[in-house]
Amino acid sequence: MKAIAQDGYGPPQVLELRDVDVPTVGDTDVLVRVRAAGVDPGVWHLTTGLPYPVRLGYGLRRPRHRIPGMDLAGVVEAVGRDVTRFALGDEVFGTGTGSYAEYALAPEGKLAPKPAALTFEEAAAVPVSGQTALTAVRDAAKVRPGQRVLVIGAGGGVGCFAVQLAAAAGAHVTGVCGPTKLDLVRSIGADEVVDHTREEITDRGIRYDVIVDTAGNRPLSSLRRALTRKGTLVLVGGEAATGRWLQGFDRQLRALLLSPLVGQRLVPLVARESSENLAALAALVDAGRLRPVLDRTWPLADAAAALLHVWGGHARGKNVLAVAGPTGR
């Protein structure tokens, strides 16, 4: 099969299109013929091996899994003997291992039936970013009707989902983004938008019940000033910072230590991936309350260019790889 592979950690240019063997199906595995795969900052971290603590779980000197990619949407090709929820030919979406390939393995508990209203490309945009946003808005922040919610990085992959989920929960949503994404963020449900190149989040004198920060480049002190006394700050990643050891994740560690000492809840997010979460997102899609926002669709061979595009902060919503060429519903 065709796959994107790497022999060692490094910039996206280490990724190469190769012919490799189809993975062997274990007893609890689902083998998916991948139609599309999502591109997100998490893949960047696993490709570069940065920050260094990433390597503790994925291989100290070289990646344990040579084929990157987590998000996927496709068709079930085979199932292990202990799999009961899926059968040959089912259309699915979710997270697996090595999705930048024509075939990938995924555990049964991290897949769900693909929403019929979505193309494979649209469905592949949902699993990682959608579940991250769901964990942030529903589980960590527990957003309620009438609350003021600020989403920083509202035009990115996670941000676009967070805006829609907060709006669906009945909150008054303000999205922070660059000038080229203002109309996009309004179109997906933000009541107000803030152009971060023209004003800072504290300039308006408004305090928010919930702040979901996906950008990673503001100090905790600034974020706390924009939060109500009993408000909740959810920190999603730290991609905007530099450094080889912790990058922006030192901010999450400081938030964890500070939270018990102040009235505000400062929550470093740990996203949960499950078929139940995917089903919840699919139900919102079916109800017309959630839609993936696609920036660009790239051929599999251009995986490195797609990663560079996303990491550079250029994405408007999600980017995906069309593994089997553009597909329909």
Image: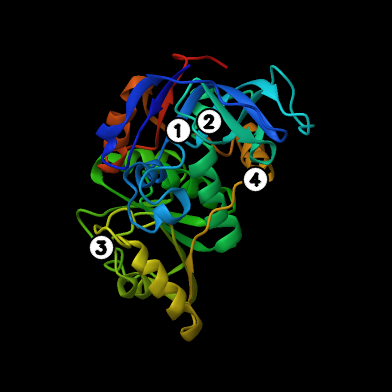
Task: Answer with mark 3 or mark 4, whichever residue precedes in sequence.
Answer: 3
Task: Answer with mark 1 or mark 3, whichever residue precedes in sequence.
Answer: 1
Helix, strand or loop at mark 3: loop
Where on the picture, by quarter, is residue 94? top right
For the question of whether residue 287 can be seen, the reply is no
What is the crowding at mark 2: few (fewer than 14 residues within 10 Å), some, or many (at least 20)? many
State which mark lies toward you, 3 or 2.
2
- Residue at the location (52% across, 58% down)? 270
Check whether the beta carbons of the residues at disc 2 and disc 1 lie within 8 A of each other.
yes
- Can you identify the residue that label 2 sits on? 72
- Can you identify the residue that label 1 sits on? 38
Task: Answer with mark 2 or mark 4, whichever residue precedes in sequence.
Answer: 2
- Can you identify the residue that label 3 sits on? 200
Q: Position of residue 149 (x, y in %)?
A: 47, 60
Q: Position of residue 219 (x, y in %)?
A: 29, 69
Helix, strand or loop at mark 1: strand
Give the alpha-carbon distance from disc 3 to disc 2, as whole Å.
36 Å
- Can you identify the residue that label 4 sits on? 274
Check whether the beta carbons of the residues at disc 4 and disc 1 lie within 8 A of each other.
no
- Residue at the location (33% across, 62% down)? 246
What amino acid is at disc 3?
Answer: Glu
